[in-house]
Amino acid sequence: MAKKSKKNKMKSHSGAKKRLSVTGTGKIRRHHSGRSHKFVHKSKARRRRLKQPTIVEDTHAKTLKSLIPYK
């Protein structure tokens, strides 16, 4: 019997898989920065905008998709 060779699997980047998610259409969603402290200096409208997740730009999407291959 011939032995079956295993194919190598890519490893997911631990930091990326905690911070990024993939939408149904395959785009990468991320959270805004600047949401941890110093809210006194930020307007209410700015704080509301920072709450919402956003889509990663196309220029960075290809690189980030390689970090989370199975997500």
Image (cartoon, grey):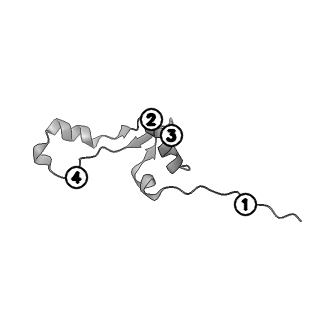
Badge 3 marks a residue whose secondary structure is helix
Q: Residue 55 at x, y = what percent?
A: 39, 37
**Cβ atoms under marks 2 and 1 closer than 8 Å:** no
How packed mark 2 is, by other alpha carbons closer than 10 Å (few <14, some 14-19, many 20 or more), is few
For the residues labelled 2 and 1, the Cα–Cα distance comes to 33 Å
Amino acid type of the residue that numbered disc 4 sits on in the rendered structure: Ser
Q: Which residue lies furthest to the right in this view?
A: 1
* Residue carrying label 4: 36
Nearer the camera: disc 3 or disc 1: 3
How packed mark 1 is, by other alpha carbons closer than 10 Å (few <14, some 14-19, many 20 or more), is few
Amino acid type of the residue that numbered disc 3 sits on in the rendered structure: Lys
Badge 2 marks a residue whose secondary structure is helix
* Residue 42 visible in the shown view: yes
Question: What label sits on residue 62 in the rendered view?
Answer: 3
Question: What label sits on residue 6 in the rendered view?
Answer: 1
* First in residue order: circle 4 vs circle 1: 1
* Residue carrying label 2: 59
Up the image or down, 31 lies above or below 11; here it is: above
From the viewer's perspective, tell me whether residue 68 is left or right of residue 53.
Answer: right
For the residues labelled 4 and 2, the Cα–Cα distance comes to 27 Å
* First in residue order: circle 4 vs circle 2: 4
* First in residue order: circle 3 vs circle 4: 4
Badge 1 marks a residue whose secondary structure is loop
Q: Residue 38 at x, y = what percent?
A: 14, 50
Q: Nearer the viewer, residue 5 or 50?
A: 5
Q: Residue 25 at x, y = what percent?
A: 50, 35
Nearer the camera: disc 4 or disc 2: 2
